[in-house]
Image: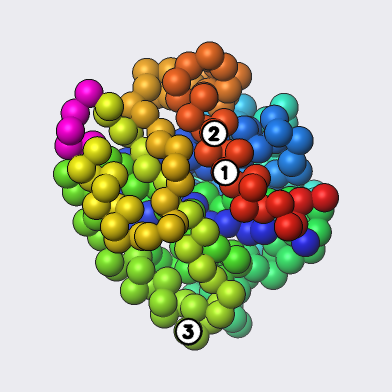
């Protein structure tokens, strides 16, 4: 049975989608069966995996709202499988309000797919609302990208409070799978200080690999491909490969 990980941080601009896309591609390169579920209405993960969101037949919206089977909506790419998003998802939070077990619709949709994958990433919206709550209820663990900047820990207390609430009331299996340090600038002492502070707050949960500030990482999404396909020799690609190896080790008990 595959591990489902929600990539979540309600603070925008922390490298959440970049992390989801590039870890999907890196783990796929390692031979794992990986699905990236784009549960953000902006659909940036969808385009980042090389898909044109305007030409998608079915999206995660159709899966969660219209009961379309997951296998009909999944698109295979050179970098891993994608359950794409679309602009329709923006209205899903309103539509879900009247649904029975509204916070469990994504879990129900992904349940049939988890046996087909070693890991499923859910790229959640940068907010703590009903779509993100669905992601947390569907997941076994969360992967939290944290940027190495001044406001790194701002808002994380809210995320941890939400995590505890979901674990207590809705999803007892939910745990912190890992914390990914992003946008690390090795030229400054400040990035190192932030990294130290994050490790102090999340002992044993922070990946040893850190994701640097890297031009290639910033450029790759405009070409609609992960950084490993855009510039495999870049520091950004190397960092995500190292983090993927760490994740693979944590998943070894589940990987076939």
Q: Position of residue 41 (x, y in %)?
A: 48, 49
Q: Which residue is mark 3?
A: 168
Q: Residue at x 49, y 78 (%)?
A: 167
Please state if 142 lies on the left or on the right of 251 as rendered: left
Q: Position of residue 201 (x, y in %)?
A: 30, 60
Q: Residue at x 52, y 18 (%)?
A: 223
Q: Position of residue 86 (x, y in %)?
A: 56, 45
Q: Secondary structure at mark 2?
A: helix
- The residue lying toward the viewer, choosing from 11 and 167, is 167
- The residue lying toward the viewer, choosing from 93 and 12, is 12
CA separation, marks 1 and 2? 7 Å
Q: Secondary structure at mark 3?
A: helix
CA separation, marks 2 and 3? 33 Å
Query: Do labels 1 and 2 touch, CB within 8 Å?
Result: yes
Count of number-bearing discs: 3
Classify residue 202 by image quadrant. bottom left
Q: Which residue is mark 1?
A: 246
Q: Residue at x 70, y 64 (%)?
A: 109
User: In the displayed structure, would residue 215 be above or below residue 92?
Assistant: above
User: In the displayed structure, would residue 237 be above or below residue 211?
Assistant: above
Q: Which stretch did the figure color magenta? A: 187-191
- Give the mark toward the camera: 3 or 1: 1
Q: Which residue is mark 2?
A: 242
Q: Position of residue 47 (x, y in %)?
A: 55, 32
Of mark 2 and mark 3, the one earlier in the sequence is: 3
Q: Is residue 122 visible?
A: yes
């Amino acid at each position: 049975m595959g591990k489902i990980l929600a990539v979540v941080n309600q603070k925008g601009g922390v490298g959440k989608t970049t992390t989801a896309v590039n870890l999907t591609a890196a783990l796929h390169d390692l031979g794992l069966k990986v699905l990236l579920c784009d549960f953000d209405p902006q659909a940036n993960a969808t385009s980042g995996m090389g898909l044109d969101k305007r030409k998608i037949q079915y999206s995660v919206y159709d899966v969660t709202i219209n009961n379309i089977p997951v296998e009909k909506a999944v698109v295979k790419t050179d970098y891993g499988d994608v359950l794409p998003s679309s602009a329709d998802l923006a209205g899903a939070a309103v539509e879900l309000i009247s649904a029975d077990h509204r916070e469990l619709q994504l879990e129900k949709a992904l349940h049939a797919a988890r046996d087909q994958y070693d890991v499923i990433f859910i790229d959640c919206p940068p907010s703590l609302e009903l779509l993100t709550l669905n992601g947390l209820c569907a997941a076994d663990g969360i992967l939290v990208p944290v940027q190495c900047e001044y406001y790194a820990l701002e808002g994380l207390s809210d995320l941890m409070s939400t995590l505890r609430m979901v674990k207590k009331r809705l999803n007892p299996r939910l745990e912190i799978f890992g914390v990914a340090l992003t946008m690390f600038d090795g030229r400054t002492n400040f990035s190192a200080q932030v990294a130290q502070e994050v490790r102090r707050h999340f002992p044993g949960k922070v990946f040893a690999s850190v994701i640097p500030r890297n031009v290639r990482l910033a450029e790759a999404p405009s070409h609609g491909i992960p950084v490993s396909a855009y510039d495999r020799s870049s520091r950004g690609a190397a960092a995500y490969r190292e983090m993927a190896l760490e994740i693979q080790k944590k998943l070894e008990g589940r990987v076939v």
